[in-house]
């Protein structure tokens, strides 16, 4: 009677991923498979999408960047939006350095920069915020993974570790502007092979990127229709790919031996009271692809597939009495994060 959600999700990914609702418009996975560059990452017209040699497969390659340090930007449309409303939690990517004229990359730090260009082509009105991470990959060392947390829900003027800037000051926001202005109006994401407050000698660089991901935070939002169902079903962890999402249903209060979590592939409903041996309001479409039956605690391994990020699942918990009567509880709309 027990079916693991992870197995169901894996099966659904292979057969009908369109059945799941998307919860995050800005979620992106750019692995450059088949030459596709979804976010239009670019340095100059010399960029090439290589078919092999990535981590794995295809990758973005700039073999001759004559600059103080490469700055690779998304196009001004694909990743534009309110990152707070989208609850973006992190941006990750793999990078490599195959050649630089001077040194081996020591002392250059990778950084992520979020830019608000105000809808103009000039830079004088741009505001931005950036975070400086670890050292860039050393020359010839192959692929190195980077993962930058994006504190989109932080409402302070400048989150810890972040720096603001504009054309008049690369180390501070312009007067009247702070983090909240930028994070709610991001137009472009930039990957810097140097701290944006530094400068360096011009030289020739050969660099690559792969597996660029803009990832939402996972969440589980309570929903209870007309409000008559008991609030017995809760999330006990953050739903994130590659980890087990856990939930709990209270069986002690009604004194029932079993609980269940139903996961629908067709979304939410309300105002449906099945009757008979099913008591309460049905809050998910009756088309299910997983039904987990346990004794209060439920665990759902989520495959480590980036394709799951931003997908929203309508789920509902409840209990089963000793006589077999089903008592419906509240619903949780589960957004899978990265």
Image (cartoon, rainbow, N blue to C red):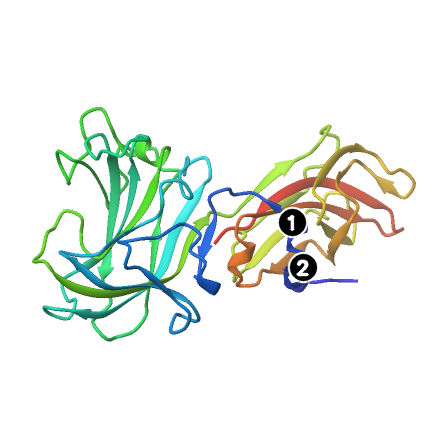
Is residue 259 something that shows in the picture?
no
Which is more N-terminal, label 1 or label 2? Answer: 2
Query: In the drawing, does residue 36 fall left or right of residue 2?
Result: left
Q: Which residue is mark 1?
A: 20
Query: In the drawing, does residue 304 fall left or right of residue 315?
Result: left
Residue at figure coordinates x 76%, y 51% from the top left: 288
Residue 318's place in the image compared with 50, above or below, is above
Q: Residues within 10 Å of mark 2 (few under 14, many from 20)?
A: some
Q: Secondary structure at mark 2?
A: helix
Q: How many labels were placed on the picture?
A: 2
Residue 258's place in the image compared with 276, above or below, is below
Residue at figure coordinates x 36%, y 59% from the top left: 93
Query: In the drawing, does residue 309 fall left or right of residue 78?
Result: right
Q: Determine the CA span between mark 2 and mark 1.
A: 9 Å
Q: Which residue is mark 2?
A: 12
Q: Nearer the viewer, residue 102 or 305?
A: 102
Q: Nearer the viewer, residue 274 or 79?
A: 79
């Amino acid at each position: 009677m027990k079916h693991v959600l992870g197995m169901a999700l894996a099966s659904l990914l292979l057969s009908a991923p369109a059945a799941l609702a998307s919860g995050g418009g800005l979620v992106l996975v750019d692995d450059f498979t088949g030459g596709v560059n979804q976010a239009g990452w670019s340095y100059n017209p010399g960029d090439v999408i290589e078919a092999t040699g990535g981590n794995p497969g295809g990758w973005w390659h700039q073999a001759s960047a004559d600059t103080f340090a490469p700055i690779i930007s998304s196009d001004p449309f694909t990743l534009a939006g309110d990152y707070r409303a989208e609850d973006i939690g992190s941006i990750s990517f793999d990078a490599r350095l195959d050649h630089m004229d001077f040194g081996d990359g020591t002392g250059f730090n990778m950084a992520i920069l979020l830019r608000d260009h105000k809808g103009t082509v000039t830079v004088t009105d741009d505001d931005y915020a950036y975070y400086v991470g670890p050292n860039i990959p050393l020359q010839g060392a192959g692929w190195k993974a980077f993962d930058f947390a994006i504190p989109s829900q932080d409402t302070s003027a400048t989150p810890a570790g972040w720096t603001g800037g504009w054309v008049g000051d690369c180390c501070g926001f312009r007067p009247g502007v702070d983090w909240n202005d930028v994070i709610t109006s991001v137009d472009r994401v930039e990957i810097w092979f140097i701290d944006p407050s530094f400068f360096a000698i011009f030289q020739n660089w050969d660099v690559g990127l792969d597996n660029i991901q803009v990832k939402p935070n996972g969440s589980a939002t309570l929903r209870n229709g007309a409000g008559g169902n008991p609030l017995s079903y809760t999330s006990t962890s953050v739903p994130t790919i590659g980890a087990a999402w856990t939930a709990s249903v209270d069986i002690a209060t009604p004194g029932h031996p079993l609980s269940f979590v139903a996961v629908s592939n067709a979304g939410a409903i309300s105002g449906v009271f099945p009757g008979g041996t099913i008591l309460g309001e049905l809050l998910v479409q009756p088309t299910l692809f997983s039904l987990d039956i346990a004794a209060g605690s439920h665990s759902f391994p989520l495959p480590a597939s980036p394709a799951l990020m931003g997908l929203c699942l309508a789920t509902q918990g409840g209990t089963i009495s000793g006589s077999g009567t089903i008592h419906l509880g509240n619903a949780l709309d589960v957004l899978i994060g990265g």
